[in-house]
Image (cartoon, rainbow, N blue to C red):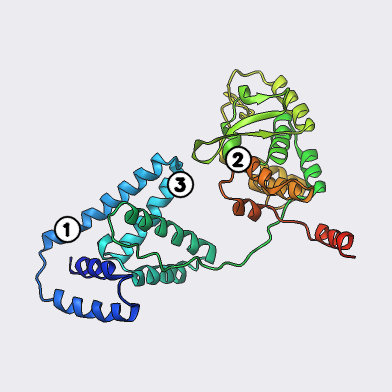
Amino acid sequence: MQEILVNSIVQALEGIVEYRDLKVIETVVRTVVERFDVSQNDMCCAEKENTEYLDLFLSAKQVEGCSEKSISYYRKTLEKMLDDIAKPILGITTDDLRSYLAEYQKQHRSSKVTVDNIRRIISSFFAWLEEEDHVLKSPARRIHKIKTDKVIKDTYTDEELEVMRDATTNSRDLAMIDLLSSTGMRVGELVKLNRSDINFSERECVVFGKGNKERPVYFDARTKLHLSQYLAERTDDDEALFVSLKFPCSRLSINGVESRLKKIGDGAGISKVHPHKFRRTMATTAIDKGMPVEQLQKLLGHERIDTTMQYAMVKQSNVKNSHRRCIG
């Protein structure tokens, strides 16, 4: 409880006095506050508030449309942070958060990307607390984005896509590969599709992306042909677009799609076949063929254009050819 009092006073003075003076003031305030006795009951109440604040934050995220998976990840990440720091939320300082992130990276040997994801969630939590007037100022404000190495991730070549198509043993898997590669949809969006969602005449379908946001995606003529063939061969009456091959032919899950694609990749001699790589391949191909990035952003369902640019890796050979054409 003493830490809460000290931190609240220091936060109230931030922006009013110089930082070097603030540290002196903090020392003086701490010396004075330590003279007062704080009961154990007050501490218990403060500990309970941590859970209350976290539940309020997660409820707000749920209202904003975050998926259950995201909310579960937020809860797990924030609960660990609060347990390890072991302070009431109102008493957590910037130094506490920095120490936690450094110790987490050391203990788990985590990548910079992982630690920055944790930083981002913590920052979002305290920014919400500040916005809702639960804290005077977020202690995460001065913890900046962690610089990470930019890694150019692989995409499938045209040859690899053809080899995978040839390695399929049924019309369902062939249609699934074509739909993923031509639309760039997420695997979570794929498994939610129903037969009635497919508009064959316009070669499009509406998917439900993150936050249950609808958007149209488009497929090519080859996908239309193979998808029509697959549906014509179906004898079940399940509404799902992609179902298991064995009775009772239930809707495929994300794990089911991932394991099936991995098996196809193993049979084709292609390592690490994953549905998300089809999405990245489609984005790269679209950029290389001249699609405006704003249009690609719409197709992929990204809120921010810089996210789209992370998916779209322009081929170096195209850069070289453009330079020769435009510069010399």
Please, what is the three-letter code of the amino acid marked with disc 2?
Val
Q: Residues within 10 Å of mark 1 (few under 14, many from 20)?
A: few
The vertical placement of 127 against 200, above or below, is below
Q: Which residue is mark 2?
A: 187
Mark closer to the chain start, 2 or 1:
1
SS at badge 1: helix
Quarter location, residue 35: bottom left
Say which residue appears at 41% left-offset and 69% top-offset.
142
Please, what is the three-letter code of the amino acid marked with disc 1?
Cys
- Quarter holding the C terminus? bottom right
SS at badge 3: helix
Residue 326: % across, % down: 86, 60
Horizontal relation, residue 132 to residue 214: left or right: left
Q: Which residue is mark 3?
A: 70
Quarter location, residue 216: top right
Residue 98: % across, % down: 40, 70
